[in-house]
Amino acid sequence: MKATRDAYGDALLELGRKYKDVVALDADLAGSTKSVKFKEAFPERFFDMGIAEANMVDTSAGLALCGKRPYASSFAVFVTGRAFESVRQSIAYQKLPVVLCGSHGGINLGEDGGSHQAVLDISLMRTLPNMKLVVPADYNETYTAVLSTIKDDGPVYIRTSRAKSPVFTEGDFVFGRGRALRTGRDVTLVACGFLVWYALEAAKLLEKEGIDASVIDMATVKPIDEEMLYDFAKSTKKMVTIEEHTIFGGLGSAVAEFLSEHYPIKLKRIGIPDVFGESGTGDDLLCKFGFNAAGISNTVREWLKKN
Amino acid sequence: MEDLEKIAKEIRKDILLMLNMAGSGHVGGSLSCVEILVSLYFKVMSYDAKKPSDENRDRFVLSKGHAAPALYAVLSKAGVFPRDMLWTLRKLGSPLQGHPDSKYLPGVEASTGSLAHGLPQACGMALAGKLDKNPFRVYCLMGDGEMDEGLVWEAFMSASHYKLDNLCVVIDNNTLQIDGRCRDVMNIYPLEEKFKAFGLYTKSVDGHKFSELISAFEEAKNNKRSPTVIIAHTIKGRGVSFMEDKVEYHGVAPTDEELKKALEEIDEGD
Ligand SMILES: Cc1ncc(C[n+]2csc(CCOP(=O)(O)OP(=O)(O)O)c2C)c(N)n1
Ligand SMILES: [Mg+2]
């Protein structure tokens, strides 16, 4: 079990070692986002901007305009929401190679509650032209995704999690490619973030009930892997999306948009309904919103009965 | 004053207890603002705990929302809700959310947590009071690290522009934020000169001395020319020696062992 935020810290450190142009910024949360590892190794290339996320993002743009490769991190809720106008105007509009990392994505951060839980960051970032969007499933995928951003010529948003979760992906992350982790006949589960693991567990539970599910790890939410969606839509005719995010504007919406135009089939979106998060342990909340293996398999089974 | 000292001790103990039971939360910045909150709710503010929605009440906005445990302990001590509720802090379904949530808990005037959003809301309340010719006063507590946010200065500018003399802001100047000392992470000092340049009446006090706090609050009530900012010099983790002035105790809850030691220490002071 490892947290994806640790992978961000480790990969950022590695990039710092390899490339002199890499600089990192944080907004008084270096210990939480794990940019602290870079800070300790390369203090002269690290800028703590204090609790000023908008300033951090615009400053990153200036650094990028002078040839630096900035990596700016804070909690997902703040780097996307608090700093949204800076991301829009200075990063996305100019198509600058700035990597934004939002740690503590979703509701699993738990007790801090709804003010701190990022449940609409994917939606915010997805509407921005030029922005690529990655929600990796585990430590390995996050690590290789962060390393791969150095090859990008535009902005990338990477969402990481606070909670430790299983490490199970193999091979390097490739931008824009989904990964089929399991192939079944009856339904395709498309997930992102560490819920991919729960989707796999749910598929095992469903198998015992005679339901044969495919599972896709859709780490790149934008640009989404349309080819893979098309193939699986065609082969299973039913699809379920699973994300630790509101069902409006995130992975579920991206899949719905694609399917309705290109291969209309029945779709069920599992995510956070039209509500904010709240306090509770991460596990309590995952359970409440039906994100654990039992919750997912129940929803899928009941939905399949009716559809 | 003796009464207030006694209340402050009980509040500190409740903060430690509730955080220990919650297993997470912000201890340092809750302990640093105890005297400020106790002065306000038990001496300075016009506030009837039995009528937390009275339209004439003075308002208090906790802009540094992570100090919620301090606010909850004080509200329950004042009688807004029963003490037993404190032990539900941060648990699923509790009105005592990790950061103050006005939807769920009477007595919480504004939802906060994302820093700097308390002050502009307090300014809005002060403007509404002026519009309605209602003489209630608005108090707002902020962190020194919170001063990093640009929004804070937009709000101060407007508070001064609209001559919100019914607004009194307190800075919990404990000199620490999360990544380190404020002056090392992002130097916000000198604060007093900044506030003066923004047209705010400014006063510096020892934030753990009731006499100084209360006289500054009274002075603010009499200042009819501008908003007042009180810079309260405080110690993060105040009252528990091993937490005092330690950046490590920003966002953690006391373990059982730490709790025991801390409670003993506070009782010994009697
Ligand atoms: C907009 C925003 N960015 C980051 C955070 C995370 N955070 C919580 S408390 C804190 C430090 C606050 O320092 P200060 O204002 O000095 O509070 P105190 O020392 O009184 O606890 C930070 C960065 C936040 N709550 N809101
Ligand atoms: Mg402070």
Image: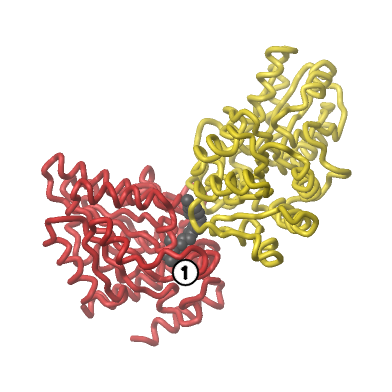
- Residue at 74% in and 51% down: A165
Q: Is residue B11 above or below residue B112?
A: below
| Quadrant position of residue B43 | bottom left
Q: Which chain does tag 1 point to?
A: B
Residue topped by disc 1? B183
A130 up-or-down from A38: above or below:
above
Q: For residue A105, say whether it is visible.
A: yes
Q: Is residue B12 left or right of residue A270?
A: left
Q: Nearer the viewer, residue A94 or A163?
A: A94
Relative to B245, is B161 on the left or the right? left
Vertical side of A266 occupied by A212: above or below: below
- Dividing the image into 4 quarters, which one contains the C terminus of chain A? top right
Label 1 neighbourhood size at 10 Å, few (<14), some (14-19), many (20+)?
A: some
- Residue at (50%, 49%) from the top-left corner? A55
Q: Quadrant of residue B264?
A: bottom left
**Colour in which chain B is shown?**
red
Where is residue B224 drawn, in percent x and y?
Answer: 12, 56
**B79 vs A275, nearest the viewer:** A275
Rendering quarter of residue A220: top right
Q: Where ligand 2 lies, by quadrant?
A: bottom left
Q: Position of residue A52 (x, y in %)?
A: 48, 52
Q: Is residue A164 visible?
A: no
The spot of residue B34 in percent (x, y) is 34, 69
Please give the letter of the chain rendered in yellow: A
Q: What amino acid is found at the position of numbered circle 1 in the picture?
A: Arg
Is the CB–ligand 2 distance for label 1 below 8 Å?
no
B48 relative to B143 in the view: left or right:
left
The percent position of residue B75, horizontal first and vertical second, equals 31, 59
